[in-house]
Image (spheres, rainbow, N blue to C red):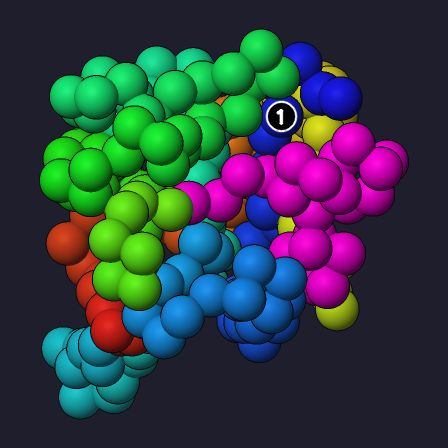
Amino acid sequence: MLKRPAFYIDMEACTGCKTCMIACIDKHDLPEGVLYRRVSEYVGGNWVTNADGSCDQNIFAYYVSLSCNHCENPICVRSCPTTAMHKDENGIVSVDHTKCVGCRYCEWGCPYSAPQYNPEIGKMTKCDFCRDYLEEGKAPACVAACPSRALHYGEYEDLVAKYGEAQVVAPLPDKGITQPNLVFRPNRNAQPAGSRSGKIRNPEEV
């Protein structure tokens, strides 16, 4: 098992096909409205008229695939009043359903919206990094399903050594909040963190 499990996302390679989402839904048999992995479509820009009457455009679009980042400082764990949300010895943030009362404090606290309320059982659920697959030496379902190989996983330190520690881009929150175990290669059109030049076009999915 990994000691500090992390995801790597190549935003240049991601086509927004959402196969990772479908694979996750299928693997965990998730009910409608519960999504452990979500793909944001971030778009923006406009046409600009120059002084000579000609027009240019600065339109951009890119995708951000996110699930739980199994953070080093998980707010969901600190927000949970029953200690149901916890980080185990393998670095995976999990929910103990024997303690969870479905109060949703973890969901409201997480800047990545990782904890998901399941109305069928009245409790919180979330990505568990496909722990059962990891124990079998297999990749998480989302990683294995990605047709463009934009998703990878491994030890955080190994991924940083291989790909570098990227700066945060819109629409991701400040990584200093939770210290997410997330490494990514920014899209060439990626906007800086906090930018208001774009918006998420599929809010119903994220």
Q: Quadrant of the C terminus?
A: bottom left
Question: At which x and y percent is residue 89?
Answer: 58, 11
Q: Is residue 114 left or right of residue 76?
A: right
Q: Nearer the viewer, residue 105 or 60?
A: 105
Question: At which x and y percent is residue 82?
Answer: 21, 21
Residue 23, relative to residue 151: is it above or below?
below
Q: Nearer the viewer, residue 182 or 34?
A: 34
Q: Is residue 145 magenta?
A: yes
Point 86% across, 36% down: residue: 137
State which region is magenta. Answer: 126-146
Residue at the spot of label 1: 5
Q: List the single residue furthest toward the front.
A: 98
Label 1 neighbour load within 10 Å: few <14, some 14-19, many 20+: many
Point 34% across, 15% down: residue: 73
Question: At which x and y percent is residue 36?
Answer: 44, 54
Q: Nearer the viewer, residue 25 or 97?
A: 97
Residue 24, relative to residue 176: is it above or below?
below
Q: Quadrant of the N terminus?
A: top right
SS assignment at label 1: strand
Residue type (three-letter) at the residue carrying disc 1: Pro
Residue 123, relative to residue 131: is it above or below?
below
Point 24% across, 53% down: residue: 122
* Residue 137 in view of the camera: yes
- In which image quadrant can residue 39 be found? bottom left
- In which image quadrant can residue 161 be found? top right
Q: Is residue 44 magenta?
A: no
* Residue 41 in view of the camera: no
Point 45% across, 30% down: residue: 94
Q: Is residue 27 left or right of residue 39?
A: right
